[in-house]
Image: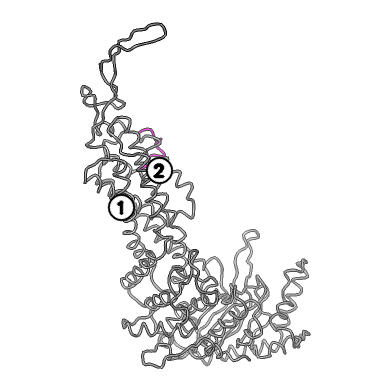
C-alpha cells in the first residue's frame, strides 16, 4: 500500500503543536454501519416501487476510508445521500443506518462535501477559510481562530496559494485540485466525526486526485474521522489508500470489504482472476458495467450473477459478522455521542450568525463586480443617455408626455436591469445551500444579512443614477423633489431586487411584461380591465413608485399652452403674404383650471390622468410592504426548497 503520508512532505504540511492548535487533538471516533439498507421511489407510470438501493449491509470504522464505486447509475450518489441523511421524503428508506450501533440524526455528527465546489470566487483561499472558521468555531478568541485557519491551510497544502483568489469568470483562480482541497478543508472546521464526499476527484487528473485522497486519508487516520466517498475509476496509487471498498451494480452489492487483496481473492473464487498488471477497480468495473450490452435481459442476467454470488459467499457472511460485532462493541447513548462531537445544533446564536454573514456578504459585494458594480456602470451610462435625450426639458405643454416617458423609462429600465446581478446571486446561493445542508446557520440569518447588505448598495445605485439624470433632464427643480425622486426610486429598485432573487429563475419574461402593461403608462389606470387592475395593478410595485414620481414631478409646475393666431393674408399670383398675425387665444392639450391664463398646472395633468387620489405616504407604505412580502416569500422558498448540491 502506498504511503499516504508522503503528501505531508511534498506539500510542506505542518501540524501545529502550540496549545492553541485546535486540530491536534483527536477525539474518540464513530463507527458508521448500515443494515439491509434500501431506498425506493414510486414509478409514476407503473405506480410500483422502484428500488434504487436494495439489501446493502456494511460498516466503516473511525480512521478508515470507504470508497463506493460502480458504473454510472449504480447508485453511488444515492447510497451516499441515504447514509448521510440527505434524501428527501419523495422516496422511502428501508433498513437502518447506525452510528456506534444506534440510530441517530446523521447531520448532527457529519459533514457533506458535494461534487461541485460551491465557493465565492472573488475571495482568497485565506478569506474563504477564515469565514468558515468564524461561522463554525464557537470560540471568541481571535488568536485561536487565526490558528485554526493556519492549521487548515497547512493541513491541506494550501499555504502557498492562501492569498490567491479562488477564481471566477473574470479572475483566474487556483487549480481544480486546490479547489477540491479547499472545499474539504472548510467542511472540517467543526471537526465532524463522519465526512461524506461525493466524487472528490471529479474533473481532476490522476496526480491531483492522488493528492486530494492522500489528504483525506491522512486526516482520517490522525483525527479519527470516518470517511465515506464515492469515486470513479481511481488510479492504482489512489485505490491503495482505501481501507474498504463497496462495489455497486444497479443499487445492489457486488463486493464489500477490505481493499488489501481480499477483493482479488473474492473475484477469483467466483471465476474472475484479476491479472497482476490490470488496475483492480478497472477490471471489476469492466465486469459489472452493462451499459453497452444493448440487450436488457442479458444485462439483468449479468448483474444478477454477481449479486447472487455475493449473497451466498463466505465473504459476505464474514462482512456481516464484522458489522454485528462493530455495533455491539460501539453502542453508545446519545449523551456520549454529544460529548464526542460537541452537541448542539448551531455554533452561534441568530444575531451572531447575522453579524458574520453580513460582514461576509459585504466583502463579497465590494469585491464581486457581478453583484452591484456592473449595474452601477450600466445605470450611470443610462443616466447620461437619458439626460442628453430629454435634455433640459422646458415647461412647454409639449414636454408633458416627455416627462411621463422619462419617468417611465427610469423606473422600467432600472428595475428590470436588476437581473444583471443574478450570476452573482446564484454563486452566493450555491454557497448557502452547501452551508445550510451542513447546519452552519439558520435560513433567517441568511435572509436578514442579504437584506442588510443589498439595501445600501441599491441606494448607491439610485443616487448614482439620479444625480446626473435628474438635472440633465431638467425635472422639477425643487430640492425636496430631488430627494423624493431618489427615495422612491430606491424603494422601487429594492422591491425589484427582492422580486429578482425570488422569481427571476422561474418566469422572468412573463413577470416583466405583466408589470409593464399594468403599471399605468401604456394603459391609463381608469381604462385597465377590472381583473388586471385588482389582480396585478395594485400589487405592482411599479404602480406605486410611478404614481409617487408623477406627483413629485408635476405638482408645482406650470405649463404654457400653445397660442392660436389670427392672420391677415394677401394673395398675389401664386404668392401668399401674411400682413398681420394676432394671438386670439390658446390651445391647451390638458384641460386647464385657469383657461384664461393660457396655462395649465401640474395638478391639472394629474387630474387628467386620474392620479388625484395619490398619496406619498400610501405609496411608501405599499412599497415597504411589498419588500417585506417578497423577502418573506424568499425566506419561505429557501426553507421549503430542497438544495441541489
Image height of 466 relative to 585, above or below: below
The answer to whether 403 is drawn above or below residue 463 in the figure is above
Q: Write down the residue under mark 1.
A: 463
Identify whether 143 is placed above or below 164: below
Colour theme: one colour
**Sequence-wise, which precedes: disc 1 or disc 2?**
1
Pick whichever, 383 or 257, lies toward us. 383
Compared with 602, 345 (above or below) is below
Q: Which residue is mark 2?
A: 535
Question: Residue 484, image x and y in percent?
Answer: 25, 47
In three-dimensional space, the C-alpha distance between marks 1 and 2, rounded to whole angstroms, equals 32 Å
Q: Give how far across and how far down residue 202 sits, in percent.
A: 59, 74
Residue 528 covered by magenta stretch: yes
Q: Nearer the viewer, mark 1 or mark 2?
A: 1
Position of 133 compared to 290: left or right? left
* Residue 26 shown in magenta: no
At which x and y percent is residue 504? 46, 54
Tell me: 597 left or right of 231: left
What SS does tag 2 mark?
Answer: helix
Residue 100 seen in this snapshot: no
Seen at 32% across and 62% down, the residue is 452
> Which quadrant holds residue 460?
bottom left
Q: What is the chief secondary structure element of the magenta stretch?
A: helix
Range of residues picked out in magenta? 526-539
Is residue 58 in sight in this rendering?
yes
Foreground: 594 or 93? 594
Towards the viewer: 605 or 64: 605
Amino acid at each position: 500500500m502506498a504511503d499516504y503520508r508522503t503528501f505531508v512532505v511534498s506539500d510542506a504540511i505542518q501540524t501545529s503543536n502550540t496549545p492553541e492548535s485546535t486540530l491536534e487533538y483527536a477525539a474518540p471516533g464513530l463507527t458508521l454501519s448500515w443494515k439491509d439498507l434500501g431506498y425506493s421511489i414510486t414509478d409514476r407510470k407503473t405506480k410500483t416501487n422502484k428500488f434504487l438501493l436494495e439489501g446493502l449491509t456494511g460498516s466503516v470504522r473511525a480512521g478508515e476510508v470507504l470508497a463506493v464505486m460502480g458504473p454510472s447509475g449504480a447508485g453511488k450518489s444515492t447510497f451516499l445521500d441515504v447514509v448521510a441523511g440527505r434524501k428527501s421524503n419523495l422516496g422511502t428508506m428501508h433498513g437502518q443506518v447506525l452510528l456506534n450501533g444506534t440510530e441517530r440524526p446523521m447531520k448532527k455528527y457529519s459533514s457533506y462535501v458535494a461534487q461541485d465546489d460551491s465557493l465565492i470566487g472573488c475571495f482568497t483561499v485565506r478569506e474563504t477559510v477564515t469565514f468558515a472558521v468564524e461561522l463554525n468555531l464557537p470560540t471568541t478568541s481571535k488568536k485561536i481562530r487565526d490558528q485554526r485557519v493556519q492549521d487548515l491551510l497547512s493541513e491541506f497544502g494550501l499555504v502557498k496559494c492562501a492569498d490567491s483568489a479562488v477564481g471566477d469568470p473574470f479572475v483566474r483562480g487556483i487549480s481544480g485540485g486546490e479547489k477540491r482541497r479547499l472545499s474539504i478543508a472548510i467542511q472540517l472546521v467543526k471537526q465532524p466525526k463522519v465526512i461524506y464526499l461525493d466524487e472528490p476527484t471529479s474533473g481532476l487528473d490522476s496526480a491531483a486526485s492522488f493528492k486530494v485522497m492522500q489528504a483525506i486519508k491522512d486526516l482520517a487516520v490522525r483525527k479519527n474521522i470516518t470517511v465515506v466517498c464515492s469515486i470513479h475509476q481511481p488510479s492504482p496509487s489512489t485505490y491503495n489508500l482505501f481501507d474498504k471498498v463497496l462495489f455497486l451494480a444497479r443499487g445492489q452489492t457486488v463486493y464489500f470489504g477490505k481493499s488489501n487483496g481480499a477483493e482479488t481473492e473474492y473475484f477469483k473464487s467466483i471465476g474472475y482472476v484479476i491479472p497482476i498488471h490490470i488496475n483492480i477497480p478497472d477490471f471489476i468495473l469492466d465486469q459489472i458495467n452493462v451499459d453497452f450490452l444493448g440487450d436488457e435481459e442479458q444485462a439483468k442476467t449479468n448483474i444478477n450473477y454477481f449479486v447472487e454470488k455475493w449473497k451466498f459467499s463466505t465473504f459476505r457472511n464474514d462482512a456481516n459478522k464484522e458489522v454485528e460485532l462493530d455495533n455491539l462493541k460501539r453502542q453508545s447513548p446519545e449523551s456520549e455521542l454529544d460529548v464526542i462531537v460537541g452537541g448542539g445544533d448551531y455554533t452561534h446564536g441568530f444575531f451572531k450568525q447575522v453579524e458574520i454573514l453580513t460582514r461576509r456578504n459585504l466583502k463579497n459585494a465590494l469585491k464581486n463586480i457581478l453583484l452591484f458594480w456592473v449595474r452601477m456602470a450600466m445605470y450611470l451610462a443610462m443616466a447620461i443617455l437619458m439626460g442628453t435625450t430629454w435634455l433640459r426639458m422646458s415647461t412647454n405643454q409639449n414636454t408633458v408626455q416627455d416627462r411621463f416617458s422619462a419617468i417611465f423609462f427610469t423606473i422600467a429600465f432600472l428595475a428590470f436591469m436588476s437581473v444583471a446581478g443574478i450570476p452573482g446571486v446564484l454563486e452566493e446561493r450555491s454557497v448557502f445551500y452547501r452551508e445550510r445542508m451542513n447546519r452552519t446557520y439558520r435560513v433567517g440569518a441568511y435572509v436578514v444579512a442579504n437584506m442588510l447588505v443589498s439595501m445600501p448598495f441599491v441606494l448607491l445605485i439610485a443616487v448614482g443614477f439620479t444625480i446626473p439624470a435628474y438635472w440633465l433632464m431638467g425635472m422639477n427643480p425643487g430640492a425636496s423633489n430631488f430627494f423624493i425622486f431618489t427615495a422612491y426610486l430606491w424603494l422601487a429598485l429594492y422591491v425589484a431586487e427582492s422580486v429578482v432573487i425570488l422569481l427571476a429563475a422561474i418566469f422572468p419574461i412573463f413577470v416583466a411584461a405583466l408589470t409593464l402593461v399594468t403599471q399605468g403608462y401604456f394603459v391609463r389606470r381608469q381604462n385597465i380591465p377590472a381583473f388586471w387592475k385588482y389582480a396585478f395593478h395594485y400589487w405592482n410595485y411599479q404602480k406605486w413608485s410611478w404614481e409617487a414620481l408623477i406627483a413629485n414631478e408635476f405638482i408645482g409646475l406650470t405649463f404654457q399652452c400653445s397660442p392660436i393666431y389670427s392672420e391677415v393674408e394677401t394673395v398675389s399670383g401664386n404668392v401668399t403674404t401674411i400682413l398681420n398675425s394676432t394671438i386670439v387665444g390658446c390651445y391647451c392639450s390638458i384641460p386647464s383650471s385657469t383657461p384664461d391664463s393660457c396655462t395649465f398646472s401640474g395638478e391639472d395633468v394629474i387630474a387628467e390622468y386620474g392620479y388625484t387620489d395619490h398619496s406619498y405616504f400610501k405609496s411608501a407604505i405599499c412599497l415597504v410592504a411589498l419588500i417585506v412580502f417578497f423577502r418573506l416569500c424568499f425566506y419561505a422558498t429557501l426553507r421549503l426548497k430542497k438544495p441541489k448540491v
